[in-house]
Amino acid sequence: MNLTATDTDVSALKDLLQVKYSQLSALLEATKAINDNVSSEGLYQIYKNTLNEQIRVKDIALFMYDQAWKRVVWQNNSQPDAFIPIQSHFDNYKTVKELSDEEQVIFGGFKYIVPVYHKQQPLALALFGEISEDISHQKNELLEFTQIFTNIITVAVENKRLFKKEVEKKQLDKELDLASRVQGMLIPKKLPKNKLYEFAGLYLPYKGIGGDYYDVIHINKDEFVFCIGDISGKGIAAALVMANLQAYLNATLTLNIHSKKLVENLNQKIYSITNGENFITFFMAKYNMLTKELIYLNAGHIPPILIHSDKIELLEKGCTLLGIFEELPKIEFGIKTVQPNTTIISFTDGLTELENDEEVQFGMDRLLQFTYTNYRLGPETFNKSLYDYISKFKGNMLFNDDISVLTAKFM
């Protein structure tokens, strides 16, 4: 028995072949654009133009997900500002489908929906209006193509986003490495130790980059300054502000440390760099080896602990934070005569605010008790014991901030 195709069958077959050829050409064009690294906006334009040609719809919407849903293609003149509640309805759709009348109301009058998943996660959602009547008989083939084409374009855009994110991460890693090296240069590798005094430092930067700084700077044969600071913020910007502070200190410490002008200039220097967006807590003290006199200023820093003969005193006098106001409202210097066998412990708030796995802070009282028990130790041994103590205290918790300690003993 011979079967012959009718003219209608032949015509339908020709139409289908023409559709498939047209779709293949569109896919090849999109692939070429992707290989040519056309921008996301360019790919969206290709997407809209292609679907206008292939399924001849007037209304097209495409949404991409990146932490939140974002509308990237919109062609709907009748409802230019329609709100589509994608977040609350996306999970109900797993594949392309024609929407019911009730669903069309929810989705702003669009008739077809194409959800896109990437590695089981929501990636995109496409919506389309009515397909042109003269090709509606090919609806299944057109919807299948639409799903494939939407997947190709949105996955390509997502890959571009992930690539850009990776490039940005590598750039950030470079900046963090630079910040870490800048910060490392601010922390002295060796501190003075002799028959008259001894210093030791403990520096634990949070995630490799700290906003802390301490130093001991000799200004003449009889006097030196020791200081400790903590800048708000992290990263390379914080490290560079601290580098500016260190450079300014080294350039100006030949001036009298208890000169208000020195402190005012220091504050204005920080303010001019940060415009008040970052501030520094800072403690500095000048010690005269002949007179045993200690002149200090505490600029909003946690007061260092001075202990002698079991008596503890906090070094609190000073002014407000540096860099937060263009002009400091009040400056007061503290003056102490340092007795033999005096220990001074300066530290940043990362120490007292350290938390254990029960969210209990290490606190000032615990530090005072540790200091009272161990201050007779040499500075290096004191710091090592303190590190062991806080490590045991925090348990499995990670350090949640920079921790710096500068311990001094005066003989």
Image (cartoon, helix red, strand yellow):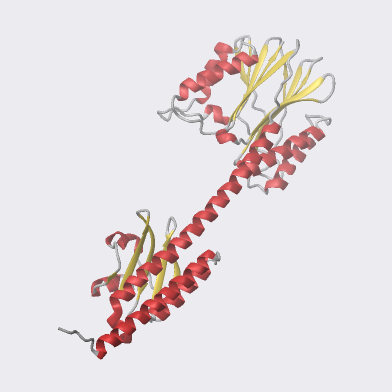
Above or below 339: residue 286: below
The answer to whether residue 236 of the structure is visible from this angle is: yes
Q: Is residue 282 left or right of residue 401?
A: right
Residue at 55 percent of width and 27 percent of height: 351
Q: How many marks?
A: 0
Give coordinates of residue 47: x percent, y percent.
Answer: 45, 72
Q: Nearest the camera: 118 or 320? A: 118
Above or below 333: residue 330: below
Q: Nearest the camera: 332 or 145? A: 145
Q: Is residue 118 left or right of residue 207?
A: left
Above or below 40: residue 382: above
The answer to whether residue 74 of the structure is visible from this angle is: no
Q: Nearest the camera: 157 or 330? A: 157
Give coordinates of residue 90: x percent, y percent.
Answer: 32, 61
Give coordinates of residue 329: x percent, y percent.
Answer: 69, 40
Considering the image in quadrants, where does the N terminus appear?
A: bottom left
Residue at 69 percent of width and 18 percent of height: 199
Residue 308, quarter of the rendered image: top right
Residue at 58 percent of width and 34 percent of height: 208
Residue 213, quarter of the rendered image: top right
Residue 269, quarter of the rendered image: top right
In the picture as drawn, the residue positioned furthest to the left comes out as: 1
Residue at 31 percent of width and 86 percent of height: 133
In the picture as drawn, the residue positioned furthest to the front comes out as: 1
